[in-house]
């Protein structure tokens, strides 16, 4: 895998369509799956060992890495590709697992405690990347996407899976509306929701959860933020973006407690109101705000009165306030109401809003600011990550039956995503014919971490 020196650190476009044996071996070596394989071997005990656990796990990973449409296609390639077999410890064609063996393995892998260890593998790789890449996770974005799946028909099996804490697939529905609130598009599916928190710059998943199609986006957003905080160095996450599904008091309060600035789109709940008097001001004050928390002042000398958006000066974290000033004085134009609002003031009228009055309405980064607009655009990173998970690595297969198998497969997909991210970050940079290749500080840090892990 060659990554040019001018490409970004995580150059997803540089991934090979058909990975070489060298790249596949590097990817398998980058996955810290020792505890997972040991747990699966202990669970097997003295049972039949026709196909060792590391072979079954390797075949599952390869089916994702090589983008096979089904596990049978991967097994067929293993039978005809000797070099690929050797990479996962298969000595001969007769040692290639059967379809039934792989199905049984996925069923076991998707149950506790193996499922928790599978998630731990992903978390370890994320922590390793966070240690080497100093800005990984600084600006995050979350989203939920629909994944199709099939339900097991056996009622007893369904009850057993629910007892293990595995959600069952169900019907989901999502409506898209225009500015007038009219439904313009409806999406329906049967399966699950995959909730992601990704780095908005590098497009690397930092945490994930799987729920039924009725899962609460806001609740899972906070859960993913907490897991990402555990995976990354302390105080790494500075902002977290999400759509209007997370615009609730609990989300804003929890992010405020974690010292994370929310970048969350506002939900329109006011029916007949367009603005309200700013809290804490006299009834005759000319300062108002709209539903999104944007602050305005009225030029009441003109006829009719003219509304102007006040100039946002900044967030005063020590005071817990947002600071606004007179737009006329700040932008250098003459306002007829200047004598009333700004007598004896050099910078004009100054307004400070206590965030604690309404954290949802007045976040640390106001919705009308350029910074909010720029950070909110980072949510497109989640769409690109979702596209890779679904289209490249088959997360939205739709033919997987049973909750354990589905959770095991999605876990393998997330592990492969993180492993590819590790390879891209650790890959030497190619500088052209005369430049050769070299290791940057991030690549050298990852190489050192690989040596420590043995």
Image: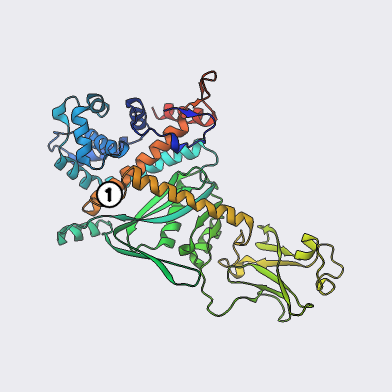
Rendered position, 27 above or below 393: above
Q: Residue at x 29, y 37 (%)?
A: 61
Q: Residue at x 43, y 37 (%)?
A: 421
Front-lying residue, 184 or 241: 184
Q: Is residue 125 left or right of residue 240?
A: left
| Residue sitting farthest toward the right | 344
Q: Residue at x 28, y 55 (%)?
A: 148
Instruction: Answer yes or no: is residue 106 visible.
Output: yes
SS for tag 1?
loop
Front-lying residue, 307 or 35: 307
x and y, in percent, of residue 349 in the image: 78, 68
In the rendered image, which quarter is residue 55 located in? top left
x and y, in percent, of residue 283 in the image: 71, 81
Instruction: Answer yes or no: is residue 42 visible.
Output: no
| Residue sitting farthest toward the top | 434
In the rendered image, which quarter is residue 417 located in? top left
Q: Is residue 243 left or right of residue 145?
A: right
Q: How many marks?
A: 1
Identify the colour scheme used: rainbow
Q: Read off the residue under disc 1.
A: 397
């Amino acid at each position: 895998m060659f990554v040019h020196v001018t490409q970004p650190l995580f150059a997803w476009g540089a991934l090979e369509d058909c990975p070489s044996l060298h790249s596949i071996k590097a990817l398998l070596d980058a996955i810290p799956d020792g505890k997972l394989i040991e747990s699966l071997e202990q669970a097997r005990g003295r049972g039949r060992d026709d196909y060792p656990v590391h072979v079954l796990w390797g075949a599952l990973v390869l089916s994702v890495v090589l983008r096979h449409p089904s596990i049978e296609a991967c097994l067929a390639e293993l039978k005809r590709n000797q070099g690929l077999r050797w990479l996962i410890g298969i000595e001969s064609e007769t040692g290639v697992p059967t379809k039934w063996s792989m199905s049984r393995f996925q069923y076991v892998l998707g149950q506790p405690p193996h499922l928790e260890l599978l998630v731990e593998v992903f978390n370890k790789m994320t922590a390793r990347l966070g240690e080497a890449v100093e800005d990984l996770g600084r600006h995050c974005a979350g989203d939920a996407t629909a994944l199709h799946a099939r339900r097991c028909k056996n009622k007893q099996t369904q009850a057993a899976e629910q007892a293990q804490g595995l959600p069952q697939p169900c019907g989901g529905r999502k409506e898209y509306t225009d500015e007038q609130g009219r439904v313009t598009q409806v999406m329906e599916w049967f399966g699950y929701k995959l909730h992601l928190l990704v780095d908005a710059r590098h497009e690397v998943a930092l945490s994930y959860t799987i729920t039924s199609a009725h899962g609460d986006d806001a609740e899972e957003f906070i859960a993913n933020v907490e897991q990402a905080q555990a995976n990354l160095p302390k105080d790494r996450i500075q902002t977290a973006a999400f759509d209007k599904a997370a615009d609730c008091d609990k989300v804003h309060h929890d992010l405020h407690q974690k010292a994370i600035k929310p970048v969350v789109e506002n939900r329109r709940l006011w029916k007949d109101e367009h603005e309200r008097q700013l809290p804490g001001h006299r009834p005759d004050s000319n300062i108002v705000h709209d539903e999104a928390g944007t602050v305005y002042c009225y030029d009441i000398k003109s006829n009719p009165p003219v509304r102007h958006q006040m100039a946002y000066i900044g967030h005063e974290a020590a005071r817990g306030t947002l600071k606004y000033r007179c737009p006329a004085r700040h932008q250098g134009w003459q306002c007829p109401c200047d004598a009333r609002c700004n007598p004896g003031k050099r910078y004009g009228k100054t307004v400070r809003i206590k965030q604690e009055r309404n954290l949802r309405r007045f976040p640390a980064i106001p919705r009308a600011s350029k910074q909010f607009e720029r950070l909110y655009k980072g949510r497109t990173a989640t769409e690109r990550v979702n596209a890779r998970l679904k289209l490249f690595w088959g997360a939205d297969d739709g033919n997987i039956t049973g909750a354990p198998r589905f959770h095991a497969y999605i876990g393998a997909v997330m592990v492969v995503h993180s492993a590819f991210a590790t390879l891209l970050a650790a890959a030497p940079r190619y500088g052209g014919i005369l430049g050769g290749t070299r290791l940057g500080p991030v690549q050298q840090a990852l190489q050192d971490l690989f040596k420590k892990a043995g």
